């Protein structure tokens, strides 16, 4: 096989009480990438469509991830990468992670799978680090493994796959505003009161239990973030109104996706998820902020091969 086309999905990280550890993978929202072998060793990015991103290999997360894998594998060929970007960079649904994860996944396939998913995540982290200035895997893990993932530790890398209840659907609203990652970080407290920490880890434990036991009621009761959301939600206009509308429309829970500005909701069944989309729409269409909304099932497979 000399060429592969893949779909690399968008992902939601920082799932409510699971700040920095819990993420999930979205279905049908994502980028496409084509990667082909070349006789000349090394990596080149030959095409980027959709958004303006660096072609320079060392400045594009796809290029840096590919170089990390190649440094280890030392293949006797090189690779050409085409990126068809649908996920807007900085939207909060893992745009850079889709490129980093997609690229190492595709190269691994072309090399006939010398690496497992954990190792691929390790290479992709090297690319993600240039976008976020730190090594983290909370969008990469769900893109590569699919479903819900928990990053137990980055060093050493430990990722747990959490089961996805069959009827769980996500609704996303992406307001077209820019939130600087530095600002989203700077606004967070350095220390948190013990009582809030206890509430947060109780919710996190019960959310994971709810996902394991298909207990939608427990999932709903656990999807709360008392640590991060009170700060970061201030950066997203109409966050409170959107959340209230989503919950009133039947969402199990609602929170900030990544570091925003996207907001996610989880619902049981497509009907509730679609009602939540209408409710979110109704809040934002009264404003002059442009926005997109999406409804999709949780993608339990992660990156998909479109053709070889
Ligand atoms: P979010 O998770 O909020 O969508 P990202 O993780 O997509 O944000 O980070 C976007 C940043 O990463 C931008 O500064 C962008 O220029 C940079 N970047 C570098 N390479 C890529 C790529 N291939 N795809 C997306 N963003 C990239």
Image (cartoon, rainbow, N blue to C red):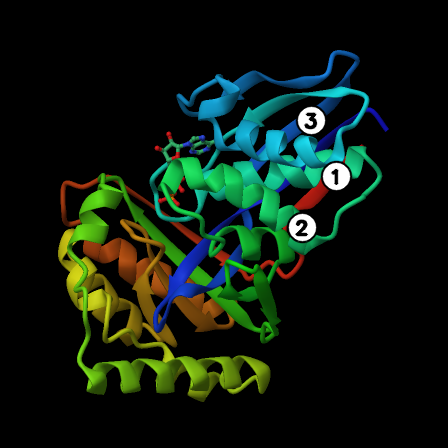
Instruction: From the top left corner, tell me how far across and down residue 26 is, in percent.
Output: 52, 54
The dot on residue 119 is 2
Q: Is residue 100 above or below residue 257?
A: above
Residue that label 1 marks = 108
Rendering quadrant holding ligand 1: top left
Dot 3 alpha-carbon crowd within 10 angstroms: few under 14, some 14 to 19, many 20 or more: many
Task: Report crowding for label 1: few under 14, some 14 to 19, many 20 or more residues within 10 A (C-alpha).
Answer: many
Left or right of 255: which side holds 215? right
Which image quadrant for residue 213?
Answer: bottom right
| Numbered circles on residues, count | 3
Residue for badge 3: 35
Mark-to-mark CA distance, 1 and 2:
10 Å
Question: Which callout, 1 or 2, points at the residue further toward the start of the chain?
Answer: 1
Of the image marks 3 and 1, the number of the one nearer the N terminus: 3
Residue 266 position, x and y percent, is 42, 69
Please state the horizontal and vertical placement of residue 287, each as a whole percent of the image: 14, 46
Q: Residue at x 57, y 73 (%)?
A: 167
């Amino acid at each position: 096989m000399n060429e592969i086309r893949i779909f690399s999905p968008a992902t939601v990280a920082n799932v409510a009480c699971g700040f920095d550890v819990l993420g999930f993978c979205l279905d049908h929202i994502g980028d496409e990438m084509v990667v082909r072998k070349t006789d000349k060793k090394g990596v080149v990015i030959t095409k980027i469509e959709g958004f303006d991103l660096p072609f320079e290999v060392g400045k594009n997360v796809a290029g840096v991830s590919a170089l990390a894998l190649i440094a280890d594998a030392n293949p006797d060929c090189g690779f050409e990468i085409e990126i068809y970007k649908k996920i807007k960079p900085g939207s909060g649904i893992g745009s850079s992670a889709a490129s980093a994860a997609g690229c190492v996944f595709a190269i691994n396939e072309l090399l006939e799978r010398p690496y497992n998913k954990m190792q691929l995540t390790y290479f992709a982290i090297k690319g993600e680090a240039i976008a976020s200035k730190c090594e983290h895997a909370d969008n990469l893990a769900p893109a590569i493994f699919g479903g819900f993932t928990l990053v137990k530790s980055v060093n050493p890398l430990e990722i747990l796959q959490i089961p996805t209840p069959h009827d769980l659907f996500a609704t996303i609203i992406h307001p077209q505003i820019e939130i600087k990652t530095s600002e989203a970080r700077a606004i967070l407290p350095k220390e948190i009161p013990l009582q809030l920490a206890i509430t947060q880890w109780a919710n996190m434990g019960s959310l994971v239990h709810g996902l394991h036991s298909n207990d939608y009621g427990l999932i709903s009761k656990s999807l709360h973030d008392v640590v991060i959301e009170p700060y970061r939600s201030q950066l997203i206009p109409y966050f409170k109104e959107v959340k209230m509308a989503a919950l009133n429309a039947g969402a199990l829970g609602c929170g900030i996706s990544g570091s925003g500005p996207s907001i996610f909701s989880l619902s049981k069944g497509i009907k509730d998820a679609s009602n939540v989309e209408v409710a979110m729409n109704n809040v934002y269409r009264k404003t002059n902020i442009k926005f997109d909304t999406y409804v999709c099932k949780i993608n339990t497979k992660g990156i998909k091969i479109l053709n070889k």
